[in-house]
Amino acid sequence: MKPTWPLLALTLLQGLSVGLAGIAAVLLVMGHQQGPMVFADQSVALVTGGIGGLSSIFHMHRLAGAKYVLRQLKTSWLSREALSTGVYMLMVALTVLAHLLAPPATGLWQVLSVLAAILGIAAVYITSMLYATIRAMRSWHSPLTVLVFFGASALSGELWAWAIAGIMHRSPRGLEGALWVLLTIMAVLKALQVRNFREAEHTVMSSTGTGLAQKPYRVMDTGTTKPPYRHQTQIWPMLTSTQKFGGYGAMAAGIWIIPVITLLTGSGLMADLFTAVAGSLGLIVERWMFFGDATHSSRVWFADEPKRSSQVVR
Amino acid sequence: MQLTIITDLNKCVGCKSCQVSCKEHNTSGEFGPVPDHEPYREVDGMWWNRVLSVEAGEYPEASVMYLPKACMHCYDAPCVPVCPTGASYKRADNGVVLIDYDACIGCQLCMWACPYGVREFDEHEGVVKKCTLCIDRIEDETLPEHERQPACVQSCPTHARTFGDLDDPASEVSKLVAQRQGFTLLPELGARPSVHYLPKRPMPHSISNNEIERVLEASES
């Protein structure tokens, strides 16, 4: 489908915010005495989550209907997303306020921090389920979508917590080890998801007979079925092999290759910042490809399908 | 009650009169539900009903089939539960799936959820639109009885399209589906579309004159 910037901003910044709030809660619970750093993490979580929430407004093309957005909590994951992200942001704001206003000894800050992290995890789960439950979007209809959303959230939070620790000249125990673990988990999940995307693309093809009782068939362009599908945003002109190679290559370079090289060879503030920026850019490309490379079941009725030769002939 | 349209793929000749009459009926200048801002330049504009040309086989053993594709008014329409505002809804009295433009926020989630790609986004009004089964015609009691049917059904010159209640076993549409083994598109996605198609019959065998003469000679001898 067509990637749009409000969706990229909402999902990425919500994930980053929850990742940072989660790491802040873990640091507090483990008693690492990193008060200023935890507070910095939570403040960045508040700002990024707020920007993400605001960008979702631009995803609505008719604001007059926005007052009805919580009407269908019983069935709609989008209604639930609006509610859960709002409640999470409220809790993060309260957490930051509690640190500023309440005496540290009361424990209120700690309790609110843990609550914010739990609500954040729920918000990411709900956002990812919005995509994973769409049966017609064959690439997304998988538990992997949920796992990759959690992986991206944890990794982006970890990368920025790493950078914030560098800026504040702190090195909390376990942060570097966690980064290595998350990079590995995310690599495995993303590899499986890209495999899923290729499987979906291969399954939804007119030449396999998908969509009709008779097969195989070819859809002829009659003038109303050609790209760029301005009125049908659920599909998009199929990415070329070069675009896919470039997209997934840039994603791999940003998320894994550059951060791993920097972690192995460099140290200091600049290296930490470089790792966070490269990783974040990689995650932006990852999310862009998540939307841009997705296959919708209605693709079989549009005439941009390339002619394919046998994939198994020798 | 589940109102629906059945299309006989043997009778459809791909003239696109259903596609054009849909646009004609639902476009009333700038204020009609189907936008038509640049009708002479915008062939990829909004169409609630699109006739696909489907080609199979290789010359000389080739065939062409035409497939009119609009909203399937599914029993379990996936576009309905995903809508956060309740703008997409399915009427209990006649099974027609409709959109309340006043409640739609234009998030387009219903377009992703629809397996058939028959919902279209109106970027000028910021809302999603689709086939209404000409609800304004079928409920208009000022029209004569025979005109209370969708514009695409009424305009079909070959009577390939039949309109009726699929839940009524005695209706013409139910009988056609039962007798002619009507099929739906993408049944594996579980939306249970009400719109059915009657499959093309196999092409008749072609028998050469030589073959006929050979059989006649054999029967005579």
Image (tube, coloured by chain):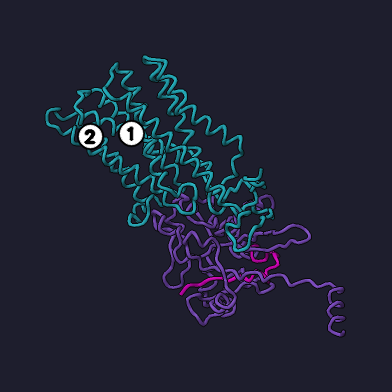
The x, y position of residue B154, in whole percent, is 63, 73
> Closest to the observer: A61 or A31?
A31
Tell me the distance, in whole angstroms, between the alpha carbons under discs 2 and 1: 12 Å
Numbered range of the magenta stretch: B1-19
Query: Residue A6 versus residue B176: which sits nearer the camera?
Result: B176
Q: Where is residue B155 in the image (x, y as percent from the top left)?
A: 65, 71
Q: Which chain carries label 2?
A: A
Residue lying at the far left in this picture: please name it: A106
B90 horizontally vs A98: left or right: right
> What letter labels the chain drawn in cyan?
A
* Residue displayed at 44% across by 46% down: A60
In the displayed structure, B99 sits above or below A305; it is: below
The residue carrying mark 2 is: A113
Tag 1 residue? A19
Q: In the image, which is nearer the foreground, mark 2 or mark 1?
A: 1
Determine the secondary structure under disc 2. helix
